[in-house]
Amino acid sequence: MKKFQSLIILIRKNKNIIIINYHYKFFKDDEKMGKVKKEDIMSILETYDKENITIATLGSHTALHILRGAKQEGFRTAVVCEKGKEVPYERFGVADEFIFVDEFKDIVNDEVQEQLKAMNAIVVPHGSFVAYAGLSNVEDKFNVPMFGNRDILRWEAERDKERKMITESGIRMPNKYENPEDIDKAVMVKFPGARGGQGYFICSSFEEFQEKIEEMKSRGWINDDDVADAHIEEYVCGTNYCIHYFYSALKDEVEVLGMDSRYETNIDGIVRIPAQEQIEANLSPSYVVSGNHPVVIRESLLPQVFENGDRLVETAKELVKPGMNGPFCLQCLVNDDREIVIFEMSARIDGGTNTFMNGSAYSYIQFGEFMSMGRRISREIKNAIEEDRLDVIIT
């Protein structure tokens, strides 16, 4: 037997006619609410007034240039904010609408979702959105149209999936250690999820691994569950680049829009101390990202840059359809053999795109105008509306 689950009424004005759209949802007694389905999102999108789309996001991470870029492309904008954290979006004037919540995770609450849908909102996910709302909630409960492929977000959050996608693309990654007891040289230890480097550390033996695990636990940066999921890989010595790509599903083309490198505490503070004082200070390095700065890569390395982006996009199409839709980032090290070694990916807009809110050297070459990643997202949405192909870029 089917039971009545919900009735959603959306009212919008079309000239002098008021159109009322009713959405009924049913489920069987023995049927649980499952994963958000694209066909359900498309049904919601059908009710939208395409001439009055709102671009919305969570008030954190890359919201400033997501919203500014949307306004540059002619969209209304909305931001979901924790109370008291709206100041940047008010002061910079990037948000037309504010939805206030007690906690960021409340974005998945029914009343917030209904407010977003009533605005004809398309939500742009970013690292804070995934971290605070919860990946399972995004996959199972967030019934609002999202830009990009929501199914691919788990492939960046789970290290084994991430590694599978990168290595099956034929892209060089650091070697992985299955057990901490096998550590026999310098390794980097990481943990799942979007944490901005918090809890990461370098060690060279099993004993040092155990010591640093206890230190990170004492600081509240990791817990026992994280330790079980520790990802251990060889430490590659080289210069750091985070390469920001955009895959246009409308054009079937990979674009390189910018690059950054990271300021990380307290490792960047330690390296400013002379070697003797470093030893005496006895400081343990940490890799929490505190900021970003723009960089450009040696031009002769750009063929590798484009090849890696192209390969990842093609593999993603096979592993998690429809694939890497929209912005993504490959974090890499360039060694002294001028080899690009990829150690991490972001399958959505990355925080380093804040370094080119008014465009980068690469986005200017690509477009001949100032183009942030936020604006590039809204340009893709605008093009999809004009071509009546929103179904290609929305999940």
Image (cartoon, rainbow, N blue to C red):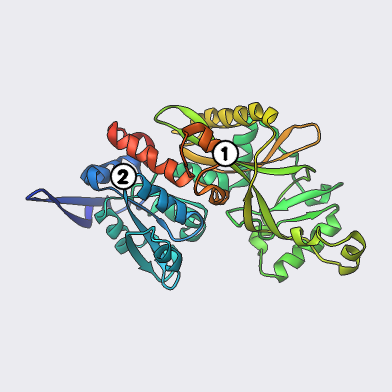
Q: Residue 29 appears in which quarter of the rendering?
A: bottom left
Residue 164 location (% of width, % of height): 62, 36
Residue 209 location (% of width, % of height): 80, 57
Q: Looking at the image, can residue 158 be seen?
A: yes
State whether residue 271 is above or below residue 385.
Answer: below
Using the image as rendered, state which of residue 262 and residue 24 is in the foreground. 262
Q: Earlier in the sequence, mark 2 or mark 1?
A: 2
Q: Secondary structure at mark 2?
A: helix
Tag 1: amino acid: Ala
Q: How far apart are the two marked residues, 2 and 1, measured between alpha carbons?
A: 36 Å
Using the image as rendered, state which of residue 338 and residue 155 is in the foreground. 338
Using the image as rendered, state which of residue 31 and residue 142 is in the foreground. 142
Please tell me which residue is depicted at 84% across the width and 62% down the height of the picture: 273
State whether residue 169 is above or below residue 236.
Answer: above
The quadrant of the rendering that contains the C terminus is: top left
Mark 1: give few (<14), some (14-19) or many (20+) Cα within 10 Å: some
Tag 2: amino acid: Ile
How many marks can you see? 2
Residue under label 2: 41
Q: Nearer the viewer, mark 2 or mark 1?
A: 1
Q: Secondary structure at mark 1?
A: helix
Using the image as rendered, state which of residue 24 and residue 76 is in the foreground. 76
State whether residue 84 is above or below residue 269.
Answer: below
Mark 2: give few (<14), some (14-19) or many (20+) Cα within 10 Å: some
Q: Looking at the image, can residue 390 be seen?
A: no
Please tell me which residue is depicted at 72% across the width and 65% down the height of the picture: 216
Residue, far left: 16
Residue 249 location (% of width, % of height): 42, 31
Please tell me which residue is depicted at 24% across the width and 48% down the height of the picture: 52
Residue 251 location (% of width, % of height): 42, 27
Residue under label 1: 361
